[in-house]
Image (cartoon, helix red, strand yellow):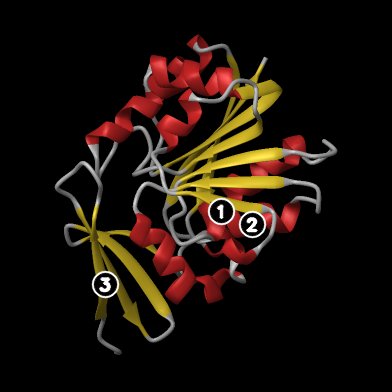
């Protein structure tokens, strides 16, 4: 078996956590403090996050999407495949090195989504972006940390609180969609979405798409 090779590391701003990028042939892994956070061979649920959201807003003439968390770019690439030429996608990524990794190493995996003229990258905390917007987005897609149960940065937890969900609600256009990725189900989070005023659907999605593997959770919450 080909051994993993270290490529680069980066500190998470405002936190002690360290991200590491590793490669094994054409396979890549991003790890936090040695624990694998994502792998380029396992992205079925990241694709599904975009698919569920875009299916609900695809008939809008000029949809505007906010994606919180670039990761390896699979969600952004899936959204671009599903949206028309008049769409606009804003990607908010807290760690500048993750953006640089996509441009240097990972973009080839997904067709170089950051080169698409519809995409704007903001190297910023998605929570700060949300706080400055009012009815700005057709959809907001959150794949930040490990979902409501954070793994890398406690500051990410705010996104999934009552206060954070109210800010997301305000940032959405009428009938806009908040889609949230999580490593697993969370009944308390479902209840918080309902309290915030969303109509909520919850889906179990295979990590490897149709090929099996662990199941992740995606919430699709519509601003009612």
Q: Who comes first in sequence, dot 3 or dot 2?
A: 3
Residue picked out by circle 1: 75
Q: State the residue at coordinates (75%, 36%).
A: 57
Residue 105 position, x and y percent, is 43, 76
Label 3, residues with CA under 10 Å away: few <14, some 14-19, many ≥20: few
Q: Nearer the viewer, residue 218 or 211?
A: 218
Give the secondary structure at mark 2: helix
Residue 124 position, x and y percent, is 40, 43
Find out whether the residues at labels 1 and 3 contact each other: C-beta distance under 8 Å. Answer: no
Residue 52 position, x and y percent, is 65, 42
Q: Nearer the viewer, mark 1 or mark 3?
A: 3
Label 1, residues with CA under 10 Å away: few <14, some 14-19, many ≥20: many
Q: Nearer the viewer, mark 3 or mark 2?
A: 3
Label 2, residues with CA under 10 Å away: few <14, some 14-19, many ≥20: some
Residue picked out by circle 2: 78
Q: In which quarter of the image is the N terminus?
A: bottom left
Above/below status of 93 relative to 197: below
- Mark 3–mark 2 Cα distance, whole angstroms, equals 26 Å
Above/below status of 91 relative to 114: above
Q: In which quarter of the image is residue 173?
A: top right
Q: Who comes first in sequence, dot 1 or dot 3?
A: 3
Compared across the picture, whether 30 is left or right of 18 comes to right
Give the secondary structure at mark 1: helix
Compared across the picture, whether 151 is left or right of 124 comes to left
Above/below status of 165 relative to 110: above
Q: Nearer the viewer, residue 24 or 218?
A: 24
Above/below status of 79 relative to 159: below
Label placed on residue 157: none
Residue picked out by circle 3: 8
Q: State the residue at coordinates (23%, 34%).
A: 154
Find out whether the residues at labels 2 and 1 contact each other: C-beta distance under 8 Å. Answer: yes
């Amino acid at each position: 078996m080909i051994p993993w090779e270290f490529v680069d590391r980066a500190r998470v701003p405002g936190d002690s956590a360290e991200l590491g990028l590793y490669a094994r042939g054409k396979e890549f892994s991003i790890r936090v403090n040695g624990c694998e956070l994502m792998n380029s061979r396992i992205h079925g649920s990241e694709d599904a996050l975009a698919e569920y959201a875009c299916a609900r807003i695809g008939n809008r003439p000029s949809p505007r999407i906010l994606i919180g968390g670039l990761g390896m770019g699979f969600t952004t690439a899936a959204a671009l495949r599903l949206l028309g030429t008049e769409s606009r996608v804003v990607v908010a990524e807290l760690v500048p090195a993750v953006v640089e990794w996509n441009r240097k190493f990972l973009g080839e995996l997904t067709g170089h989504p950051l080169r698409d003229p519809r995409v704007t990258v903001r190297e910023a905390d998605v929570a700060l972006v949300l706080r400055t917007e009012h009815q700005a987005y057709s959809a907001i897609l959150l794949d930040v940390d490990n979902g409501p149960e954070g793994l890398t940065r406690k500051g990410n937890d705010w996104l999934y609180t009552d206060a954070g969900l109210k800010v997301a609600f305000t940032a959405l256009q009428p009938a806009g969609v908040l889609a949230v990725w999580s490593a697993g189900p969370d009944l308390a989070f479902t209840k918080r979405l309902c309290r915030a005023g969303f109509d909520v659907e919850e889906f179990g999605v295979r990590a490897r798409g149709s090929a099996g593997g662990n199941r992740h959770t995606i919430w699709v919450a519509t601003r009612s």
